[in-house]
Amino acid sequence: MSLRLASLLLGLALLLGGCSAPPDGQQRQFLAMGTLVEVTLFDIDPPRARRLLDEVEAEFQRLHHDWHAWEESPLVGLNRALAGGETVEVPAVLQPLLAPAIRLSAQSDGLFNPAIGRLIALWGFQADEPARRLPDPARIAAEVAARPRMSDLILEGNRIRSRNPAVQLDFGGFAKGYAVDLVVEQLRRRGVRNAIVNAGGDLRAIGRHGERPWRIGIRDPQRPGGVLARIELGGDESVFTSGDYERYFEIDGRRYHHIIDPRSGWPAEGARSVTVIHPQAATADAAATALLIADAADWPRIARQMGIRYVLRVEPDGSVEMNPAMATRVQFMRQPPPEIRLTAALTPETAP
Ligand code: ADP
Ligand code: MG
């Protein structure tokens, strides 16, 4: 077993905590989109569950191929055309991703920026294993100066071009969430009421875990293998975490991780991890990425713009910052509990 797979298995087991291997649930695990996916269905008889799980697995593998950012795929073909200044038809499999990617990028003030594919490649993260070398700072600076943005894209019906040849799309910041949403919708159409779709610890849960709500753990970025807090989920919610410990390499004791601040071109230094709860997984995923990059004083504003109601950030010193509504939902497991700071409310409904 590769080291990466072993660590993926560890992360998944940890995050499921008390709700894995349910006695009356049907479960499947497989690798897709660079992570271990685990799908659990409740109250479905085993032969039917097997068919549904076959469909779900096939769907994930199809999306993994369609959206792949560096192996030959519809996305790689589109990126070639954009770099060449051509006007082309958006491949059908990419059409549904574009509008939400543009919207979420604008709402995040461009911190979530799927147009920075060239920067992500430069840092060596468009690879199964990171390249583990520092890019030339002059090239990073040149990429930042070229200012690739989603608003550089010009869409006319199904045709697209970029007014900026530096735009290269990489949907890694929200593709997993988007895939989770598609699969949950697919399961719902088939009549599934109670299920959890977990992609490497990021998940969307619908219905209940038998007699009780779904309960999940948030990984502690300060202690490998530790659980920071537990959350109980409502009838349809997603929980996504972005962290500096997920994909990274170290040089001279410094960590370089895979979430790049588009303003500097360097790995984000905002926080150690950010956890977001939101109904839709794609939005939760993009928001977790954006809020990890956001400055300490500014993240509540970005969260509001993205329509997010629950955020928990672990700051570089290990303390926790969250909004009051999130505080009512988390139960801390770390002993002693972390130092906690509450921000102002994110929404009028949750104002004290
Ligand atoms: P994970 O997928 O490991 O849970 P994220 O959802 O935060 O983590 O996504 C990280 C991926 O997002 C990177 O591997 C890269 O492909 C892409 N990415 C990095 N920086 C940004 C950014 N500023 N905006 C959008 N996508 C980004
Ligand atoms: Mg993300």
Image (spheres, rainbow, N blue to C red):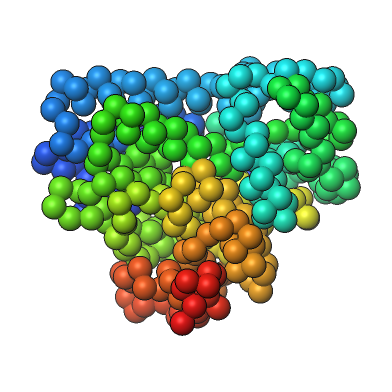
Q: Residue 338 in the image: state x and y as whole percent.
A: 42, 77
Q: Quadrant of the N terminus?
A: top left
Residue at 39% in and 45% down? 203
109 w.r.t. 67: above or below: below
Q: Residue 255 in the image: state x and y as whole percent.
A: 61, 55
Instruction: State the image quarter where residue 197 is shown.
Output: top left
Res 63 visible: yes
Q: Is residue 247 left or right of residue 154?
A: left
Count of marks, rendered view = 0
Residue at 61% in and 19% down? 92
Q: Is residue 145 left or right of residue 23?
A: right
Res 248 visible: no
Q: Residue 108 in the image: state x and y as whole percent.
A: 67, 55
Q: Is residue 337 left or right of residue 314?
A: left
227 w.r.t. 188: above or below: below
Q: Residue 95 in the image: state x and y as whole percent.
A: 62, 26
Q: In the image shown, does 60 or 8 lie closer to the viewer?
A: 60
Residue at 23% in and 55% down? 213
Q: In the image shown, does 86 or 77 lie closer to the viewer?
A: 86
Q: Is residue 208 left or right of residue 14?
A: left
